[in-house]
Image: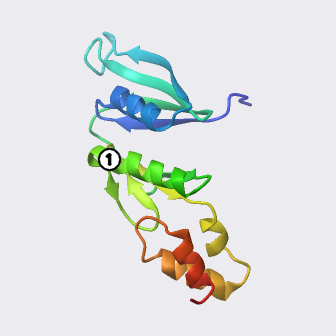
Amino acid sequence: MSTNGFTTCLWFDGEAEAAADYYLSVFKDGRILRTAYYNEAGPGPVGSVMIVEFEINGQKFVGLNGGPEFHFTEAISFQIHCADEAEADYYWEALTRDGGQEVACGWLKDKFGLSWQVVPPGAIDLISDPDPARAARATAAMMTMVKLDVAAMRRAADGD
């Protein structure tokens, strides 16, 4: 049985090092752990980056330069549970700049195509309210949003 926890492997087409640097610039609590390079065994060019191991907020990642065969999809995303609206604004702006894309319902894709959910405080509480009518109104409001607006979701839940 493993005692090392989990490491998320992110497949890139030659951009693993740039992606790791980018994520470390967005999330301030992080560091590069190790970089490994392709050797004569391949399949990448000798001396090019094969993997970059990095850590963000205690979560370990491996960026693998695996080639063009696989791409990120919305089937996998990372949720950022924000402490306040200012933090939600920060992550939304940081992850959509330089080619990122706003999607819907608090989801976005960063410039590498990785999906993120920026969750301001209170959003999950509203859509999971014990009163099914309140939860339905909050959820219906959320479904019309790109970036989540908790105040608008709360007004909808309250029937305003």
| Percent of width and height locating residue 67 | 29, 33
Per the image, label 1 sits on a secondary structure element best described as helix
In the rendered image, the vertical position of residue 157 relative to residue 39, given as above or below? below
- 129 sits to left or right of 99: right
Residue 11 visible, this angle: yes
Locate the N terminus and report the quarter of the image it occupies.
top right
Q: Is residue 106 placed above or below 159 in the rendered structure?
A: above
Q: Residue at x 56, y 83 (%)?
A: 156
Label 1: how many residues lie within 10 Å, few (<14), some (14-19) or many (20+)? Answer: few
Residue 65 in sight here: no
Count of marks overlaid on the render: 1
Near-viewer residue (33 or 157): 157
In this picture, residue 133 sits left or right of residue 67: right
Residue visible at 69% across and 77% down? 129
Three-letter amino acid code at the position of disc 1: Arg
Image coordinates for residue 151, horizontal then vertical, percent: 55, 73
Above or below, 62 relative to 115: above
Residue 60 position by quadrant: top right
Residue at 56% x, 60% y is: 120
**Pick the front one: 151 or 61:** 151
User: In the displayed image of the protein, which residue is found farthest to the front?
Assistant: 86
**In which quadrant is the C terminus drawn?**
bottom right
Q: Is residue 115 above or below residue 33?
A: below
Residue under pointer 1: 97
Residue 79 position within the rendered picture, expressed as x and y whole percent measured from the top left: 54, 53
Residue located at (43% from left, 24% from top): 52
Residue 111 is situated, as x and y percent measured from the top left of the image, at: 31, 45
